[in-house]
Image: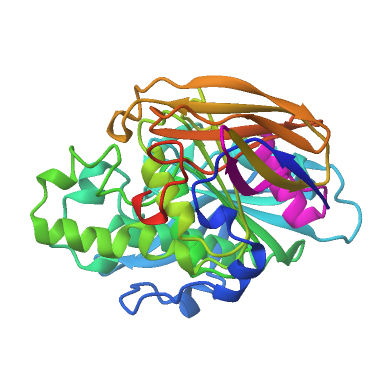
Amino acid sequence: MRTRGYLAFVAALALATPPTRLRAEGPAPLPAFTPWDVRALAKAPAFEWLDRSGKIHSLLYRAEPYKGKATKVFAYYASPATLGVGGESRKRFPGMVLVHGGGGHAFRDWAEVYARRGYAAVAMDLGGRIEEGRALKRLPDGGPPQDDHTKFRLPDLPDKDQWSYHAVADVVLAHSLLRGFGEVDPDRTGVIGISWGGYLTCIAAGLDHRFKAALPLYGCGYLREHSAWTGSQFDRMAPEWAARWAKLWDPSSYVGSATMPMFFVNGANDFAYPLDSFARTYALVRGPKNIRVEVGMKHGHIFDVRECLMFFDHQLKGEPALPRVTRVTIDGDTIRVEVEGPTKVVAAELCYTTGGPKENEKRPWVRRPLTVEGDRIAGDRPPAASTAYFVTVRDERGATVSSGLGGSGPEPAPREKL
């Protein structure tokens, strides 16, 4: 892979740490209080097909008990073979676990997107529901519903009856199920989650090291400190319950144990998962990682973000990698970045704001083009009044990635302040 120089800022985060150091440190051990039995969840659950007549199949798989009763999870499954495209040979497909967000459900269209791209994909419902004729209905033996009251306001329930416990277990069990299908290559599987699904992906990545790639879209940790739920939920909790929730169910307790390459994607003004919490989360990951922050990115169940698809195509199918910012230096009034990647970068842009982190959703971002001259990209450093900044780079394929988030002032911010 060629190394290219780029203008950007990466604020002394692990992203800018040399890869050898990342590997030497290794992942953090799971905390002793981890409530999931990872070995038990690694066993393929019992399941039953509901409908295999169409291109997208549906099924139920057995999950963890809820309030003393056995539960089942509804899911869609699709692959090139079920679609009738590229399933003639005995070649095994890479597998994908698709984790929906709040307000979402098992998306058959999402499974089809990945199946058409050459993957076997499972998309499960994490709210104890089943889809019948495009209508969502409560499963009589479903797990806990997915709503804010159930997620945050039931401190008297045992840990294993909490929504986060069940949702994470359902994701890992779906992975175990997928790996057991004969047409799936169990050594090439990934997980992507959107919003609350990204939150779950951060946890699952720390628990389930069988995944070879993981991508949280929007979702991150540090929800108690700064998120859409800080004021509406955590500030209204009893302090003891808020502390226990954050300890057991926040991704910051687990994502540092991830071993697989991870790709963190978010919008600069995301209303739910602000950039300071986002940066603190990806800084915990000690293994290979990449970042994509976009000014103006909308929040929603978007299934075909170009860079997300390309990330998995590289990690699971051996296709060319995305570029990745590896090092940042500030020399006087100039800022420079080194980036590695197999393709030519054709554009770069500095993005900075003078708004505070608590104003994440509303603070304006200034976007300033940078000069790209072969392997060198250079430009003016962010102004002294900047409170946060990053650089995006775009390659000849149209793929865009970014540096990490910068902190207060023009100098690289200390890690502990991010």
The residue sitting at the right extreme is 89
Q: Where 34 falls versus 93 (above or below)?
A: below
Q: Where does the image place residue 349, in percent across and percent down from the top left?
A: 62, 26
- Of residues 16 and 46, which is closer to you in this image? 16
Q: Is residue 132 visible?
A: yes
Residue 103: give x, y in percent of width and height. Answer: 38, 35
Colour convention of the picture = rainbow
**Percent from the top left, x then y, of residue 62?**
46, 65
Left or right: residue 155 versus residue 38 is left
Q: Quadrant of residue 308?
A: top right
Could you tell me residue 30's position as x and y percent? Answer: 42, 75
Above or below, 418 against 182 in this view is above
Q: Is 374 displayed left or right of 114 in the figure? A: right
- Badge count: 0
Q: Which residues are magenta?
A: 306-333
- Residue situated furthest left in the rendering: 238
Side of 4 where 36 appears, left or right: left
* Nearer-the-camera pick, 359 or 305: 359
Residue 308 appears in the rendering: no
Near-viewer residue (22 or 66) = 22
**Is 376 included in the stretch rendered in magenta?**
no
The residue lying at 18 percent from left, 43 percent from top is: 233
Residue drawn at x 64%, y 56% is 190
Which quadrant holds residue 166? Answer: bottom left
Asked if 29 appears above or below 292 in the picture, the reply is below
In magenta segment, residue 311: yes
Q: Nearer the viewer, residue 216 or 14?
A: 14
